[in-house]
Image (tube, rainbow, N blue to C red):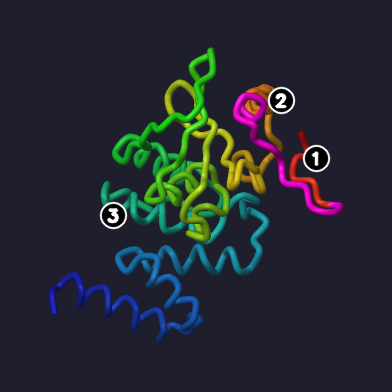
Amino acid sequence: MRLNTLFEETKYKSLIKQGHDPKLVNTARSISKKYIVWVVKMLELLENESEEEPSWFEYDHLKLITDYAEQTNADLDKFDLSNIEHIFNYATDYFKTHHKLSYNPIFKFDNGWAIVKVPPEEIKLEGFLMRNCLKNGEYTDNIYSLRDRNNRPHVSMHIINNTIDEFGGKANSEIKDSYKQLIRLFMRSSGIKFLKFGDMDVGRRF
């Protein structure tokens, strides 16, 4: 057994002996063996519904942060829920720089923005950057993204059969009016509609 592996196994067993919830420790282990102690601390704070918990933060963000730390040797001990947005932003900036989102525009606007079809292998990254459910791996195709001139995502959409059946801004926040105008132009030009089924109207916010 390699020294690093032995050290990680020792940390895992030590956390169990200290009385931490074994299920939670195993969850932390699946996120990061190297940073398991820090992840356990964060998971316990999240489970205790700490007042410091940012409303947008979810378990999967820990994976992005620990992946970043493993590649940059960032000191995670300096971060807790009160300032975790800082390390999350560092991580997303790092992955945007080192794992550039591809640019596959299907519709270009006069202002340099575009609607981009997100390749299947980049859907999770889109989700991390947008802080939405795409990061969970539930979608494998048919994801489109409103991108600015620098290829940064601002609105994610699921479009199938020329129909938008789901969309969202960052952290599923309300979409800016300027973004709505661009999406309406794209829809008119491309024959795209919002899903309507019975009383459900996906485009009611537009």
Q: Quadrant of residue 35 in the image? A: bottom left
The C terminus: image quadrant: top right
Distance (Cα) linking label 3 and label 2: 39 Å
Tag 2: Cα neighbours inside 10 Å, few (<14), some, or many (≥20)? few
Q: How many marks?
A: 3
Q: Which residue is mark 2?
A: 177
> Splitting the image into 4 quarters, where does residue 190 fall?
top right
Residue sitting farthest toward the top = 110
Q: Residue furthest left?
A: 2
Question: Looking at the picture, which amino acid does disc 3 mark?
Answer: Glu
The picture places residue 44, in percent across and down from the top left corner, at: 55, 69
Left or right for 89, reference 56? left
Front of the two marks 2 and 1: 1
Chain-order first, disc 3 or disc 2: 3
Spatial distance from mark 1 to mark 3, Cα to Cα? 43 Å
> Which numbered tag is attached to residue 70?
3
Give the SS element for disc 3. helix
151, above or below 101, in the image: above
Q: Are marks 3 and 2 in contact (CB under 8 Å)?
A: no
Q: Amino acid at mark 1?
A: Arg
Three-letter code for the amino acid on which mark 2 is drawn = Asp
Q: What residue is disc 1 on?
A: 204
Q: Residue at x 62, y 24 (%)?
A: 189
Label 1 crowd bin: few (<14), some (14–19), many (20+), radius 10 Å = few
Answer with mark 1 or mark 3, whichever residue precedes in sequence.
3
Residue at the image position 48 percent from the left and 84 percent from the top: 19
Determine whether 118 is above or below 12 in the image.
above
The region drawn magenta spans 186-199
